[in-house]
Image: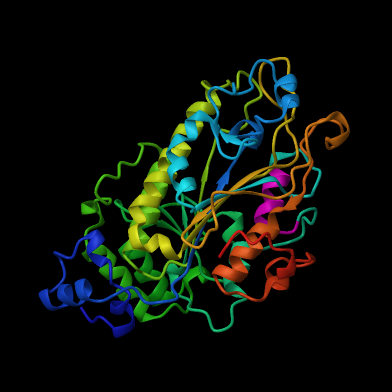
Amino acid sequence: MSITRRVFLKGGVMTAVGTAALPAFLTRTAMASETLPGNKRLVVIFQRGAADGLNIVVPHGESTYYQMRPGIAIPRADVIDLDGHFGLHPSLRPLKQIWDEGHLAIVHAAGSPDPTRSHFDAQDYMESGTPGVKSTEDGWLNRTLSSERGGDHQPFRAVALGPSLPRILSGAAPAIAVSNINAFGVGGSNPAARPIAQTFEAMYDHTVDSVLHGTGEETFEAVKMLKASDPQQYRPAAGVDYLHGRFGDALRQTAQLMKANLGVQVAFTDVLGWDNHVNEGSSEGQLGTLLRDFSGSLAAFWTDLGPLAADTVVVTMSEFGRTVRENGTRGTDHGHANVMFVMGGPVKGGKVYGQWPGLAEDQLYQGRDLALTTDFRQVIGEAVYRHLGNRNLPEVFPGFDGAPSRFLRVLG
């Protein structure tokens, strides 16, 4: 098999997915080479269903929070205190160490400025990056790549972990959806999983799918390398134990692709189940169970990345938050502002960013919701501009004033 110099130089951590299938001289080169500088990565995680930001990052220093939620508020004794005013839900314990190390930041009262309470519309707006505009055809994460001048167009550059390509990665830049690395299942614009060797060969030889059109033989050789490395033999870093489930599996495979060093620049996955209208729970219950999986998987991913974490930023978002008051079925209804996590090597963590609007009656949005003070595009825009180095923010977020002067300075 012919291996080009550029692809192989990107194999500095190819041993993470095994090198036994490679010729000895290639194995030695892979083990000796280093990750190329400037290989910045952005991972976006969508909490679908509208997560309850007020019970995730709890304003325990505000008595109104407890008055509004007599049945589902997180008791002060259970809250993992962060700064005397905010604290983490107890199920987020695995994230506390990352916070203490300064690699996890929180942005509260953040989200989309559009007032819709429709899951479908709100998710569409946050993925397109144009709140209130339904005519946008592509996603902001795809535009992040397509607006870069002279960017690399290999297929592993933009990856979604799931059976189909999400709205956020739709657009002109090549992107793929990987359903299961171990089964070599890959989807492009077609949501059905297909064998990776046959699929990529067909796409390259016949250009039957515009998603991978023009990627070139070099990329196809990189795909062959992934297959030859036998992904089923992948083992996470020592001490890392991903939780079994869809989200944990997705992050495990994201780490696997990054450590295979095939040029992943942006990655996306989502986690479902946040629409807790009934019996949401307090320290325990539906939300607590979700958050244990969420935090445990994120912490495992962070540790598994090892040295790659230094050049990786992870951002979480959800379509909107929940009502400040609990409802009559001990749940919460569709709200407005929410909370975002930003994790990574360049993150100036250990701090809650954004302006806190308060929970008093006259401070609520439409008399019922946490008011929004930080547009999610300010957070994402900073990651795109300062971390990925894309200066074309007007193309990434058309119609939005994303000037660097508006950044929260979450990244160092």
- Residue at the outermost front position: 84
- Coloured how? rainbow
Q: How many marks?
A: 0
The residue depicted at 42 percent of the width and 38 percent of the height is 94
Question: What quarter of the picture does the C terminus occupy?
Answer: bottom right
Q: Is residue 276 left or right of residue 40?
A: right
Magenta region, main secondary structure = helix
306 shown above or below 396 = above
The residue depicted at 54 percent of the width and 49 percent of the height is 350
Tell which of 410 and 44 is nearer to you: 410
The residue depicted at 22 percent of the width and 64 percent of the height is 15
30 shown above or below 292 = below
Percent across and percent down for residue 32 are 21, 75
Percent across and percent down for residue 162 are 46, 50
386 shown above or below 139 = below
- Residue at the outermost left position: 24
Q: Quadrant of residue 26?
A: bottom left
Percent across and percent down for residue 118 are 74, 39
Q: Which residues are magenta?
A: 120-130
Q: Is residue 247 left or right of residue 339?
A: left
The residue depicted at 32 percent of the width and 64 percent of the height is 198
Magenta stretch contains residue 122: yes
Is residue 65 among what the camera can see? Answer: yes
Question: What quarter of the picture does the N terminus occupy?
Answer: bottom left
Magenta stretch contains residue 129: yes
Percent across and percent down for residue 315 are 56, 53
Is residue 180 among what the camera can see? Answer: no
